Image (cartoon, rainbow, N blue to C red):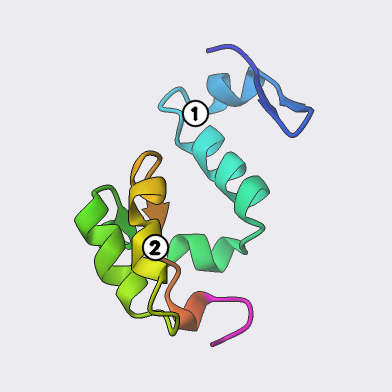
Amino acid sequence: MSPVELDGVMLPAPVDRVDPTGLLRFLVALAFSSARRLAAMRQLVWGNILLTESAIRQRLILCADPHVPEWAPYFAEQGAIWWPAQTDKGGV
């Protein structure tokens, strides 16, 4: 695999020699782009990964703003991660 760029910072290819599965690269990219702690990433489960519009809509309905579920089509294009409150930095 070739190096990957994250906000102008290059993650070098040696990462792929350490872990050819790409999981290490994924975790570094996730930590960098989400600014989440390692503990929060370790607590993610498959159910936290939202890949369909309906799954995203169901989670957005839990938000206080009634218009938020209308955003689901925009998130569905890329997918989303639901960070549970107990792993959130704010703790809410």
Q: Is residue 91 magenta?
A: yes
> Which sits in the foreground, 9 or 69?
69
Residue 73 percent location from the top left of the image = 33, 49
Q: Residue at x 41, y 69 (%)?
A: 68
Residue lying farthest right?
8
* 31 to 56, vertically: above or below: above
Residue 6's quadrant in the figure? top right
Q: State the predominant SS element of the stretch in magenta.
A: loop
Residue 37 percent location from the top left of the image = 62, 64
Residue 7's quadrant in the figure? top right
| Relative to 63, 90 lies left or right | right
Q: Which residue is mark 1?
A: 19
Q: Secondary structure at mark 1?
A: loop
Q: Residue at x 64, y 47 (%)?
A: 33
Q: Residue at x 47, y 83 (%)?
A: 86
Q: Amino acid at mark 1?
A: Asp
Q: Amino acid at mark 2?
A: Leu
* 81 to 85, vertically: above or below: above
Measured in 3D between alpha carbons, the distance from the residue under mark 1 to the one under mark 2, in whole angstroms, is 20 Å
| Relative to 74, 31 lies left or right | right
Local packing at callout 2 (Cα closer than 10 Å; few below 14, some 14-19, many 20+) is some
The residue mark sitting in front, 1 or 2, is 2
Q: Which residues are magenta?
A: 88-92
Q: Which residue is mark 2?
A: 44
> Which sits in the foreground, 53 or 68?
68
Residue 60 percent location from the top left of the image = 36, 70
